[in-house]
Image (cartoon, rainbow, N blue to C red):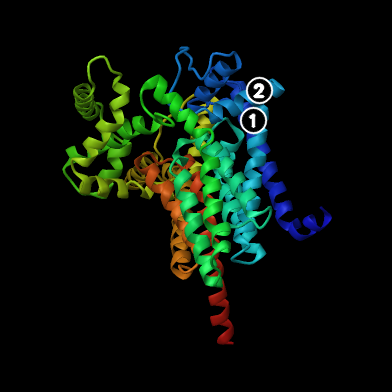
Amino acid sequence: MILFFREHRRVLIALLFVLLIHQASFLYFDHLSAQNPTASAYPIFAGDSATYVEMSESLLVGKGLAGEDGALQRAYPPGYAAFLAVSKAITGSYTFAAIIQIFATLGAAFLIYLMTLKFVSRGWAIAAAMFYGLDPSVIFASTTLFSDALFSAMIVAVVYMLFFAERPPVLVRSAIAGFLLDAATLVRPIGEFLLIVLPVLFVILSWIEIRTRGRKGKIMIYHNFLPAVVCALTALIIVVPWVYRNYSIFGVPEIAHVGANNLLYYNARQFLLFEEMNTLNPLAALKAARAQTDLQLAAVDARIAEELEKATPPGQMSTNYEGAVAKRLLLEHPILYGYYHSVNIVPFFITSSVAAYQQYVMQARDSSGFYAPTFSALWQNLRDMKDRFATRDWGGLVAAASAVAPIALEMLFWIIVTLLAAGAVMLRWRDPRVILFALLVLYFAFLTGPVAIARYRIPAEPYLFILAGIALSALVDRIKATYGSTR
């Protein structure tokens, strides 16, 4: 333990600072919620958090995974609600769940440091860990009852166990990784494709490593295929029974219905709005996903309802056909939808955690500021600045600029991080682990698509910061070499 602290004392001290910031954020929101008579007792928050608590309370009283109306729910997988239920059963409070999440986030930050250390010096590795731990979205998600930070920490642990850890033995690591992947998927269903993707990537990456070292035969089987099989089988231990449960009750083999629902009422709905605009203007594509009139929405909703009614056989639940209807609507114009989806990935990389944190403060303080897209607020503030400049209202201009500056600076920060991450891929494209990080970033970006908010970027941030650290380290080294050579 003493040797461990000596070796990693700088990052441990840095993570202690991160812990204090998380604790301060928790106490701040706890204070705001306590002063707001319409707010729930923190760390319970409006939205998904309240839904998870409803399911948790249902589990605690033995009613199964049900919502507030008492009906069995299918929208969410059971993992996060079960986690909350166990936390409250042990301690009598949901605060313990937030404490676990904070330390899980710190653990993820430490693993980010260890993985980054494989590529760059200790200082850059600490920076990558710190940027993750101090991101406002990560701070908020880890201190309230949202599943994003816990899910992200679990996926980081899976990646570390599969691709970076050297102990325990490879089959044990694979089993641990599979169990964590299983649990993570039941916390957030966006991880469902990773059940296959990560074991396959393990086979590919370990095969490249083994071939590079010139090993064959039994060594390849033991270090390549067998661990992937162990990981995949372990990852399906709980997922398969849960999928069967949903099939036996609802008639659809799914981990969670939220994916099909989002595909219809977010992706397809907003794409239909974009089609109505009859333009390829990327700003129009962004606007379709974030700012619509009631009249536009009414027309699109009527079409969706009509398509859903036609697709649903008599006596069947229409919810079972939401995914099929969504896919049909999107594939009517697949190239146009591909363009629309790609444009709407941009906010995933640059949306502001600062703006999101400000909205959470408003929600906790006075139950306002819900569902205010960052981009819409930014454009509104920029238009306000333009109007105030035109009328020579200098005081108002300064106030508007002060509101815009933190958001604009953070968006610039994320643009730089994203460009550096892309640069790392170009610099180190022969390194399979760099390609792994890039694929994980793209996985979360493409699956999130038009519903991107700052909180949904959290699972991709560890790999963005690692890649950015690799590129920035190489850039600084090159500048030093060039500057030194001219002296």
Q: What residue type is labelled 2?
A: Lys
Q: Name the residue under label 1.
A: 97
Q: Quadrant of residue 330?
A: top left
Q: Is mark 1 on a helix, strand or loop?
A: helix
Residue 4: horizontal and vertical position, in percent?
Answer: 78, 56
Q: Residue at x 40, y 34 (%)?
A: 372
In this orientation, does residue 39 appear? no
Q: Which residue is drawn at 70% across and 42% down?
A: 20
Q: Which residue is drawn at 67% across and 40% down?
A: 103
- The residue carrying pointer 1 sits among few (fewer than 14), some (14 to 19) or many (20 or more) residues within 10 Å by Cα, namely many
Up/down of 379 relative to 465, above or below: above
> Is 470 positioned to the left or the right of 260 in the image?
right
Residue 196: horizontal and vertical position, in percent?
Answer: 45, 46
> Is 233 positioned to the left or the right of 378 in the image?
right
Residue 460: horizontal and vertical position, in percent?
Answer: 49, 49
Q: Name the residue under label 2.
A: 88
Q: Is there CB contact under 8 Å for labels 2 and 1?
A: yes
Residue 457: horizontal and vertical position, in percent?
Answer: 47, 45
Up/down of 202 relative to 184, above or below: below
**Depth check: 291 or 114 in front?**
114
Up/down of 140 relative to 113, above or below: above
**Depth check: 288 or 84 in front?**
84
Q: What residue type is labelled 1?
A: Ala
In this orientation, does residue 290 appear? yes
Residue placed furthest toward the front: 218
